[in-house]
Amino acid sequence: MSLWVVGLVGCGSAVANGGAQGSTGSNASSTTEEGTPSSETSGGTADSGISAASSGSTSGLGSGAETTTGASTHCQVEVLESTQLSPERFGALTVPHGHPDLLVLGGSGWTLAGTVDAPVVERFLEPLGEMLAGRFGPDGGWAYAHLTDDVVDVLPLDDPDTAWPTTFGDDTPVLVGDMDQDGLDDLITARDGIVGVWRADGTGSFELLAESAESYPDAFRGFAPATDWAPPAVLIAQAPNESGILGLEVADDVLEKVYTVDVVGSWSMQGVQPTGQARRAILVASYGGTLIDTTPGRIGFIEGQDGTWTGRDIEFADFVEAEPRAVDLDADGVLDAVFATPGTGARLVGACSQGDELAPCLELPLTGEAESLAVDEDGHVFVATREDGLWFHRLGTCQ
């Protein structure tokens, strides 16, 4: 059964997953800037190019809603505040859950502390490349990982003058995720298509835990954290090959292919908490493209139980280059998706789960093109843009 089939010709550039991190910190210049809240809005969907998937479509995940007569109706999420927190380019965003002071980390080395009303923006490090952030510092503390040649330096956020090096050889860290369920974040690497897991040992160092038996060249990768029923997994999609999404789990010292989801053309995959009786759930973004007829891109959730996968998705006319995020926008206990459209007229878009479909429920103009999104525990949305710095969006109720 094909859940999701997307054309890949003329689809634009792919989004690279992850990057290298870490190294010695310095006292960087600190910037604080008062943002200018935008006017409050409840958002709309007119002329957005976004619609719920057509009913009975062979290229969609769910039954969807009619697109010829307009998208399925849903309550609209109120936008209470939109504020620029910093003019700096943050790069890939990470929310350091549990850290007492920091709100957001940027892969470019900028950090956000304080509050959104009184933000404190500091340059932790000017890295050689995009850094990764995770709970792999000493005693499981938050840290950056900075790649220099074949060495990864772990830089504790609370001790920037200390670096803990690990030699990785030709393995390049691309993702962060707790693969051995010990409460510490591990580094997921790539080497000529071989996927590896380097286990954080709690001292700021790593050791090789497992590698894939097969090579996955030119693959997109994602991480699926453990659920109540399923262990964590590395997610693999080999666009433009139509091999679907592969789930690799640790078995002894091997990353073993455990499941395949028949969704092709994917460039972003993130495991999320499943709803109902599902064991696994993945938020997926796929490119559209042009072959003979234009094929819309898609963003949606797929859920697996006993080898059967179901899903719900939404299609859009634009390409999406920032990975979508999952958040319960309408407070109904079911995860929804938020993503950004690129280019001139960029917009922050919300798609709310409504039965077996996703329906538009938020649309907010952005002042710059988004390169990364993050959502905190309170459902606040942070948007890192290429041209206009870091923005904060406070969302209200769905009306």
Image (cartoon, helix red, strand yellow):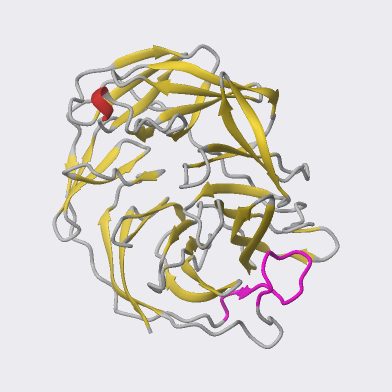
> For this rendering, which residue is in front, 324 or 39?
324
Q: Residue at x 58, y 32 (%)?
A: 249
Q: Which residues are magenta?
A: 47-64
Q: Is residue 1 above or below residue 132?
A: below
> x%, y% of residue 319?
61, 59
Residue 73 located left or right of residue 13: left
> x%, y% of residue 142?
27, 33
> x%, y% of residue 22?
35, 25
> For this rendering, which residue is in front, 104 or 203?
203
Q: Quadrant of the N terminus?
A: bottom right
Residue 157 located left or right of residue 208: left
Q: Looking at the rendering, which quadrant does residue 61 occupy?
A: bottom right
Q: Is residue 268 above or below residue 144?
A: below
> Magenta span has 97?
no
Q: Quadrant of the C terminus?
A: bottom left
Q: Residue at x 76, y 74 (%)?
A: 56
> For this rendering, which residue is in front, 128 or 357?
357
Q: Looking at the rendering, which quadrant does residue 181 occupy?
A: top left
Decide whether the magenta segment is chiefly helix, strand or loop: loop
